[in-house]
Amino acid sequence: MSEATESYETIAGCKVQMLRGGKGAPLLFLHGGGGAGVWLPFFKTLAEKYDVIVPEHPGFGRSDTPDWLDNVGDYANFYLEFMDKLGLTGVNLIGSSLGGWIAADLAVRDSSRLNTVQLVAPAGIHVKGVAKGDLFLWSPEQLTRNLFADQAIAEMLLAMQPDEDERRRRMKNALMLAKVGWQPRLYDPHMRKWLHRIKKPTQIIWGDSDKVIPAEYGPAYRDLIPGSKLEVLKNCGHLPFIEKAADTVALVSKFIEGSKR
């Protein structure tokens, strides 16, 4: 039951690729700027307890690029319609990086279908005096290295040669990330005013060595979402689900199970 099936859903006139596997309460995972489309080991682990749903955002990978897509708010509204279309309730929402920004914006707008919210190194806000890494200016090698504290992971990824389809996918993803996150860089200047509207149990997870969005953003997010909790993973970069998979999955599962009490 932890293996995934691939399907396509058409929502708001946009056909999106989706991976889904497991059983239990729904867990909707919103990916970051690198895209999705692959059933990674941590999805398989989560699917042992939950119905894991991993759509590829409009404009990314094998999903269509709709004319109406201009900003992160459009993504938030899209995923509200996505949950309506699939009839999802009691959703455990998780967003990573760009996906965390989308998840936060979604929860601000309408949390009626949500059970919990978990934001993993989310973009979306700006902390004065704390600069983000400018991933739009990094070379592909710099970006790969700056995603991880453990450079052995970066070396392994850099040694893999992408085929033509993968190169095209990466270019498509990079262009869409730039469209929604270029100016201002990876944040909405109005978001912090409304994060107090998130009323569902919320956990924020960050790596202490994040070079994309520094760990100092974690306390800022926590303080803007009433009652939220922050967990910081040691010796971890921007992708805790990859670099510290077991620890991150444990935090996610514990938080969801704790919300039932």
Image: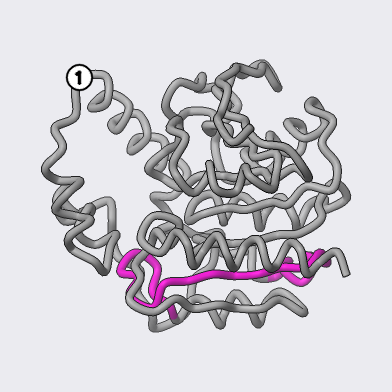
Judging depth in this view, the residue of 156 and 193 nearest the camera is 156
Q: Quadrant of residue 170?
A: top left
Q: Taking 161 as reference, is 230 left or right?
A: right
* Residue 255 percent location from the top left of the image: 70, 67
x 56%, y 28%: residue: 4
Which amino acid, by three-letter code, is at mark 1? Glu
Q: Say if 106 sits above or below 128 in the image.
A: above
> Is residue 146 on the magenta stretch?
no
x 60%, y 26%: residue: 68
Provide the residue designation for mark 1.
164
* Residue 231 percent location from the top left of the image: 55, 77
How many marks do you count on the picture?
Answer: 1
Position of the N terminus, as image quadrant, is top right
Q: Say if 202 sits above or below 135 in the image.
A: below
Residues rendered magenta in the picture: 193-215
Judging depth in this view, the residue of 52 and 185 nearest the camera is 52
x 78%, y 45%: residue: 25
Q: Taking 42 as reference, is 5 left or right?
A: right
Q: Quadrant of residue 225?
A: bottom right
* Residue 103 percent location from the top left of the image: 64, 52
Q: Taking 88 as reference, is 47 left or right?
A: left
x 77%, y 42%: residue: 24
How many other residues sit within 10 Å of disc 1, few (<14), some (14-19) or many (≥20)?
Answer: few
> Is residue 214 on the magenta stretch?
yes
Judging depth in this view, the residue of 9 and 173 nearest the camera is 9
Disc 1 secondary structure class: helix
